[in-house]
Every structure is written in structure tokens, then in C-alpha cells.
Image (cartoon, rainbow, N blue to C red):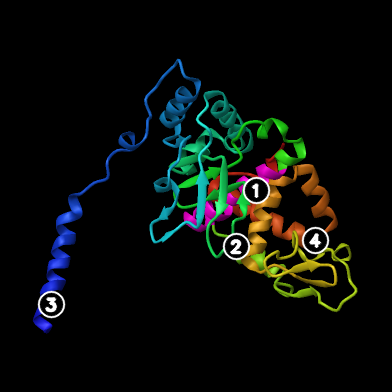
Amino acid sequence: MRRIVYLLMLLGMFSCYEEADIHVDDLEARYNLEDDPSDPVQHYIYEFYQQYRTIILTNPTIYDYKFNFSQKNRIDITAPEQDKDLLYEGIQFIEDVFIDIYTPEFRKRYFPMLIIMADTIRDAGWGSTEQRNSVSSTNFVAIGNIRKGFVSSLTSDEIVKMRADINGSFWADYMMKAKGWYTVDSAFYKVSADDYGKVVIGMFDDTTLDEIDFYEMGFISYDPEASWIEPGFTQVQNPREETDLSQWMRFIFEKTPAEMEEICAKYPKMKQKYEVLREGILAACDFDIGKIGH
């Protein structure tokens, strides 16, 4: 029996060795990256790929976003309507809320293989069907809401919120978690160490949410996954480390430098955490969050 097992192990090792020369076809074989000057969408896709080696994908399939090496991404993406005017409007929207925030040098070095355009992005795990503005994973950033009439109907405040959601997710889930290009210094977490996960409003408290100053503790908000806010049934809990960082990364893309300066002047813990992030990101990725504007 041992000989059989040993033989199977050798065969497995040999098969792996034999497959070492197998290579993945060039990206050009999977995606249309040819130039078409008569088509503004295709011409943009071609030029963007030539400059940054990132593919803007207008018609994604499950194979482009579902599989993430060791596990499946628990999302479903609906492609936009393949209308040229809509797709070009979508590209302009993605420029505004994502691409133009970063320098050409940053795009060349850090942008993912795919920028996926989506009509709708939904959670597809653990019974959730929540709709998202954006998802970032190992090799892509997906940006949703590319549908007729949606972008043109957005207010300036709504665009700011979407920009924060898209870029916060990009940094928390792609730049940090997936790629590890920036690791947060432990000093960030030490600022709020005594308050992580603390219940600030119990079910039988008379305290209201408006009475809790999360900035005072260095937090952006409460933990939505661990809190319930219903009439007569309210419990509010502070975020833990991972949620805190995720909320912070969205927050810095939501606020102008002037707004951040005002907040930091009033709240010492917010200032400490902001400075840790700014100095660390600048040193690691040559990107200054203190110059983000909208």
C-alpha cells in the first residue's frame, strides 16, 4: 500500500513538473485590445492599455471577476448595456471618480489588470443581495452604476460619496489586502485601542446616536455589522480594527484637505490617525492623501 501511495506522489510531482512549461495565452487573445479610431470607446481602451497595461472591460463575464485564485469572490456583476454612448459616458465617469485621482506614474505601477465597468454589483454570499458601488479584488476594480440616466442624475454630494466608496475600497481591499503595497503602522490602531468593539449604546440605554461623538475616539462611525438601530431596539458598537481602517480609507477620499484640517484641529485622535496614514502611504506609494480634492 505504501508503495502505491509513493508511486502516486511521484506521478503527481512529475505531472506538475511537466506542466511547468504551460503558459497562459496573452491578454490580447482574451480581450479586444485593437485600436479603432472611429470608435471612441475602443480607441480609449486601446490607448489606456498601451499606456498603463490595464484593460478597461465593458462587457464582463463571470470568468473576469468570480474566481480569485484561492477562493471565489462572492459577488455578481451585471454588464452595462453595450450602447456606445452609454459606455463612453461610463468611461468619463470612471475618469472622474477613479482614474484622474492618480498620476500617470501611479497608474503604471499600481493599477490592476482590469477596470471592470458594471451596471450592477451585488453581494452573492451568505444570503445577502446588497448592491455595491464598487468592488476591488486581486486583479480588478469593478465600478458599478453604468446605466442610462444614472450618472447624469447624480448630485455633486452623491458623486463625492461614490468617489470615496470606490477609492476607499481600492486602497483597503486591493492596495493593502490583496497586494500588500502598503501596510498600516500599528500606531494607527494604538490611538483607539481602548475603544475598539466597545458597546456605546446598550439596548436599554436612553442615549441616542446623535449624542455619540465618534471623532472623539478616533473613529469615523459605528460598526454597521455589529449594531442594530431600530425603534425600541438599539445597540451601537464601535468598529474593530479592520472596519475602522476600511471606514478611514473611504473617509479620506470623501473630505477635502480643508475639511480634514478642520477635523484634525478639533479632534487630537483623528489627527494622530490621519497623520499615520498620510505619512505611511506617501512613503510606501508616493501618494499624498493630503492633496486629494474634489
Give the number of the disc on residue 215.
Answer: 4
- Is 57 on the left-hand or right-hand side of 7? right
What stretch of residues is rendered in magenta? 161-182
- Is 88 on the left-hand or right-hand side of 18? right
Q: Residues within 10 Å of mark 1 (few under 14, many from 20)?
A: many
Amino acid type at mark 3:
Tyr
Of the residues tagged 3 and 4, which is closer to the observer?
3
Asked which secondary structure carries label 2, the reply is loop
Which label's residue is closer to the chain start, 1 or 3?
3
Q: CA distance from mark 4 to mark 1?
A: 19 Å
Query: Percent from the top left, x then y, of residue 232?
Result: 85, 72
Q: CA distance from mark 2 to mark 3?
A: 47 Å
Q: Quadrant of residue 32?
A: top left
Q: Tell me what residue is drawn at x 49 percent, y 42 percent.
A: 111
Of the residues tagged 4 and 1, which is closer to the observer?
1
Q: CA distance from mark 1 to mark 2?
A: 22 Å
Which label's residue is closer to the chain start, 3 or 4?
3
Q: Tell me what residue is drawn at x 16 percent, y 66 percent.
A: 13
Which label's residue is closer to the chain start, 1 or 2?
1
Q: Which residue is mark 1?
A: 165
